Image (spheres, grey):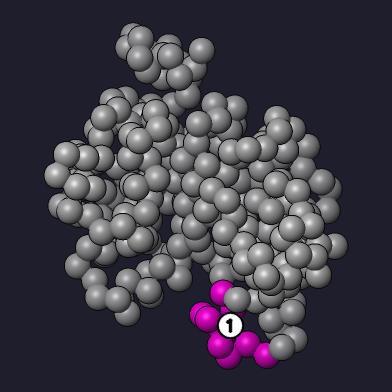
Amino acid sequence: MIEQSIKIEPIIATDNKGIVIDIRGLYKSFGAHNDVLKGVDITVDKGENLVILGKSGSGKSVTIKCVVGLVAADKGEIKVFGTDITALDYKQLNAIRIRIGFLFQNAALYDSMTVRQNLAFPLKRHSKNLSSKQEEEAIKEALDNVGLGEAIDKMPAELSGGMRKRIGLARTLILKPEIILYDEPTTGLDTITSREISELILAIQKKNKTSSIIITHDMACAKLTADRIVILKDGIIEAEGSYEELEKSDNDWVRSFFI
């Protein structure tokens, strides 16, 4: 279970109601013969955890990278908070990105920086008017939220895989995002630590009303965190529903994920 010291402070969410991410007809290829996404339609409701499943190479991570503009879509519409990000310039896109947290598969910490410096980095970039005291309070709050206040002066190399994931999540939370995109949040972790990360994802959603897309191969994570699941196959959506609905699917290929 998650340590008792973890606390999640409420985040002020967008005033928008209903759909916060609306993807329509998304296509993406890498080279002439590598079509990854072939007309994907996905929506995420405010406050919803959507899990995307699929075999390796099915386009799961590419999808969420398109949502934040890390990968440019070839065709299609990607509305975030009602704005089509495919039509935005760099400055406009960054204004949307500030409202979105992205937890990379490897936590993407800077190895040459302490935990404190890693968390200060996004604050210095996006919250330049903070005083030193306010910055320190924000860092400590983010670390307390993931139960790792004592790690503030450690280097990433001194942390376990699960701790690195938590620090990466703390850095994601420090800007108080309304949407969080998780790319394989439990990959490489033992069963107990994986469950702790999954429980933390669920706690963040419930306390902060965040909307999330979770890319995972971990069915235990999917079962615990998902309000809804979509399954990608060969660049298109093969199935959609709750964990329980898909587990009982008549489609043998879909059901194979749940065995």
Q: Determine the residue positioned at 37% across, 54% down.
A: 65
- Residue 112 point in image, percent of width and height: 67, 70
**Depth check, front residue: 202 or 165:** 165
Residue position marked by numbered label 1 in the rendering: 124
The correct choice, above or below, for 259 with respect to 131 in the image is above
Mark yes or no: residue 141 visible: no
Picture quadrant of residue 171: bottom right
The correct choice, above or below, for 244 with respect to 104 in the image is above
Question: How many labels were placed on the picture?
Answer: 1
- Residue 256 point in image, percent of width and height: 43, 14
Apparent side of residue 148 relative to residue 76 in the rendered image (left or right)? right
Apparent side of residue 23 relative to residue 164 in the rendered image (left or right)? left
Which element is circle 1 on?
helix
Magenta stretch contains residue 127: yes
The boundaries of the magenta stretch are 122-131
- Residue 188 point in image, percent of width and height: 63, 38
Q: Determine the residue positioned at 19% across, 47% down.
A: 31
Quarter of the figure with the N terminus? top right
Q: Determine the residue positioned at 74% across, 58% down.
A: 157
Magenta stretch contains residue 220: no
